[in-house]
Amino acid sequence: MYVLVVRRSLTNIGGPVRSWGAPEPARALAECLDVKPVEKLPFTHGFHPYPARMHPETARRVIERFAPSGRILDPFVGSGTTAVEAIRAGRPFIGTDVSRVATEIAWARTRVWTPEDCRRIEREGRRIAREARTLKPETLPPWAEAERAWYSLHTIEEIVALKALIETVENEDVRRFLTVALSSLLIKLSKQESDSITAPARGFRPWPVGAARGMFAERCSEATKMLLLLSSDLYKRKIQAPDPEFRVADARTVSLEPTSEDLVFTSPPYPGTYDYTRQHRLRFAIIGADAAFTERHEIGARREFDPTRYAEDLRTCLRRMLPARLVILIGDGAEIRSDRLLRDLIAPLGARLTAGASQERIDRSFDRRGQRRHEHLLLVETVRPEVIHD
Ligand SMILES: C[S@@+](CC[C@H](N)C(=O)[O-])C[C@H]1O[C@@H](n2cnc3c(N)ncnc32)[C@H](O)[C@@H]1O
């Protein structure tokens, strides 16, 4: 039995929240940001680790307070926290991300299935884990050979066997979901330090033979419980949300056609802080995603951070989000105060920062020393719509 419940990427230690701007939204933003750290996430929120995930309670509160009607759009959807809370609120949702790893996770986390379909994940997961015991690959396929150094040999062989068996599942939805379940385990099984830290782990201890198979079966059982919880919650509250839409796209060029009825609720990459392509490098092959595309289009990455370029990229993205109302969660990084940067970028676009709330955070998941930075929840509203597309 493998216990996999600890999700460290949300254990930020939050300090006091300060808010400013128009009193009513400022108070609401402060309430949305002031949430408790959690170890175990509700519904499907804990299905897959993801660096810089949004706190689900922040997502729930923002949608409740700032999105009384219209669509919810998230051009940096990541693992889909806003998407899960949008469907829990019964709202139409479109999410995009530059990484198909992200959109597949978000897709998996937002499945509202019948109890019978949810239970298929557990059943198929256990069957595949059982059959993988007798499937030892003679040679590693090229993708696994390329990643061989990141695993013990028996572990990568088990991953290859699991992937091969998942690919034989006929039902496309089940196959996609099981693929994401396997992806959720990769970093834990590998020599990479953690989901956020891309260096090889100091003091790596090989997993025992059978660990990957056992974890996979366990993860599929957990996932079934999560899916059942999500669908029964919606059923009990008689909520029927349209199926959310996910696309792989660059937020600088994506065409979501936002209107003033929509809420764009998103969390862009923090300046020079994360490196999503590298953090997920072991997942691209499993998911069948194009790492080169993601690497080329990722903005704000730590690996090659340039503040001028970041500001320009963010401005291009913001322009495409207007004239919708925007609620943006963003953290400081690379010595940039993101709230001030956003305020300066937004003004020439005919919009203004109406209110904001900020909280000092110590993020131990990213750096063992504990990085101090502020996280901001900002409300942007269009004041001069004619300027936006000038
Ligand atoms: C802060 S994370 C979003 C986390 C998300 N809110 C969650 O709860 O999982 C930022 C996301 O922006 C994505 N990203 C980076 N550059 C992008 C671009 N040019 N266009 C679209 N998405 C991009 C990254 O892949 C990452 O998933």
Image: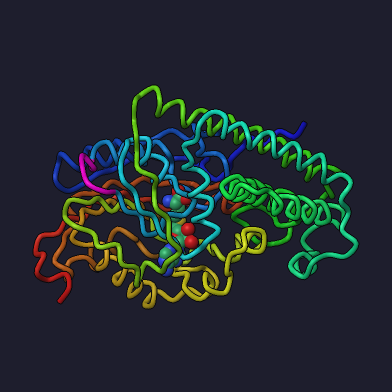
User: Which quarter of the figure is the C terminus placed in?
Assistant: bottom left
Would you place residue 259 above or below residue 209 in this image? Answer: below
- Asked whether residue 67 is drawn in magenta, I would say yes
Which residue does the image show at 60% across and 60% down from the upper left? Answer: 279
**Residue sitting at x 39%, y 53%:** 245
Residue 209 vs residue 10: left or right? right
For the view shown, which residue lies furthest in the top direction?
236
Residue 75, x across and y down, in percent? 36, 59
Q: Which is more toward the observer, 46 or 314?
A: 46
Q: Position of residue 256 (x, y in %)?
A: 30, 62
Residue plotted at (83% across, 49% down): 205
Residue 291: image quadrant is bottom right
Foreground of the two, 261 or 196: 261
Quadrant of the image containing the N terminus: top right
Up-down relation of residue 348 to residue 172 (above or below): below
Task: Write the residue at 14% across / 41% down.
Answer: 23
Q: Which residues are magenta?
A: 66-71
Colour mode of the rendering: rainbow
Q: Pinpoint residue 306: horizontal percent, then vertical percent.
A: 44, 76
Quarter of the figure with residue 96:
bottom left
Q: Is residue 96 left or right of residue 348?
A: right
Give the answer, above or below, for where 245 lies relative to 214.
below
On the rendering, which quadrant does ligand 1 occupy? Answer: bottom left
The extreme front residue here reads: 170
Residue 166 in magenta? no
Asked whether, in this view, residue 227 is left or right of residue 205, the answer is: left
